[in-house]
Image: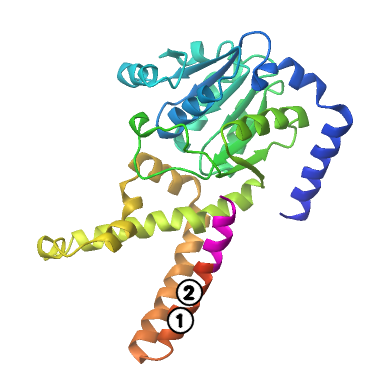
Amino acid sequence: MTGRIAKQFCFLVCYNEKYKIQRKIQAFSSVLGKETMRCIAIIGLGLIGGSMGLALKKTRLEGVEVVGYARSLERAKKAMEIGAVDRVEIDLLAAVDKAEVVILAIPAMAMKDILEQIGTRLLAGCIVTDTVSTKVKVMEWAKEYLPPEVEFIGGHPMAGKELSGIEAAEASLFQGCAYCLVPGKATSPEAVEVIVSLVKQIGAAPLFITASEHDDFVAGISHLPLLLSTALTSITTKSPFWGEMSKLAATGYRDMTRLASQNPRMCRDICLTNQQNILKWIDQFAEELSRFRQLIADGSDLEEVFAQARRERQRWLEEYDKKD
């Protein structure tokens, strides 16, 4: 955690302790499942949006209506069938009309248009968050299109799988995962606490981070692996001998190419909204691969290189397992 983020986090904690976050938490008691009917709108009912709805419904929040928005009747019907939402709208503005929290679980390149459409129709005091895997562009669009009386907190759950669509949604998707939160500069501590409460209720762990740090980090640990998986699939399946090669492909190939099964539109949007960071990591990977090529050509130090990588991965796995 950087110094600036640490200060921001300390400010939030101190503010909440002193004032007990009275106004927003009391007004939006639905996050804690109390009192009168309140409304949470989920825009986009794919894997993430559907899983978000299922996770919220599983917590059995009293007096909370979860409204979903889907462009297709088929997806809307499926969302109702699996119990991801209480009600589905196929009209975007109708979905957010009475919402006090709006969760945008949509592709990155759709964010600008959706924010522009809903901006003037949101309730004063409404809290908007998102689940997009890039943050700098999203924060810029939110600042441009949302009015001052609407609060925005960027979000990104570090969870998912190669399957897409609401058919793959599951209530436990966010259990134990880090959930990145990027409050806007003018976001109130009360609004942040509402989203923190929501994140905790679906089983995730809030992680405060800046938009620029987020995009740089995920380019290395998420977006680069996606591209490597896709490139490996592309180069091998283009081989004139793929028909025979494929008979030998087993668990190693399956695991390495898993990410190539992700939603193509989502993958495209990731690349278009995080270009510079992804290009930087591609260049670094190309340099490292070139180093490996030279080591193989020379036939020297190979075992130690593999041993070091194995040690580093094992160290990471041990830290990762501690979260469980």
Residue ID at (80%, 38%) = 12
Residue 182 - label: none
- Whole-percent x, y for residue 128 in the image: 61, 26
Quarter of the rendering occupied by the N terminus = bottom right
- Whole-percent x, y for residue 113 in the image: 49, 27
Q: How is the image coloured?
A: rainbow
243 lies left or right of 150: left
Give the alpha-carbon distance from disc 1 to disc 2, as whole Å.
6 Å
Residue ID at (45%, 74%) = 287
Where residue 119 sits, quadrant-wise, is: top right
23 lies left or right of 291: right
Label 2: which secondary element: helix
250 lies left or right of 82: left
302 lies left or right of 174: left
Residues rendered magenta in the picture:
315-324
Q: Which residue is denoted by mark 2 in the rendering?
A: 309
Residue ID at (63%, 52%) = 213
Label 1: which secondary element: helix
Mark 1 and mark 2 in contact? Answer it, CB < 8 Å: yes
Quick check: 183 above or below 320?
Answer: above
Quick check: 94 above or below 284?
Answer: above
Where residue 266 sits, quadrant-wise, is: top left
Q: Is residue 175 magenta?
A: no
Q: Which residue is denoted by mark 1 in the rendering?
A: 305
- Whole-percent x, y for residue 164 in the image: 35, 37
The kind of residue on which mark 1 rests is Val
- Count of residue discs: 2
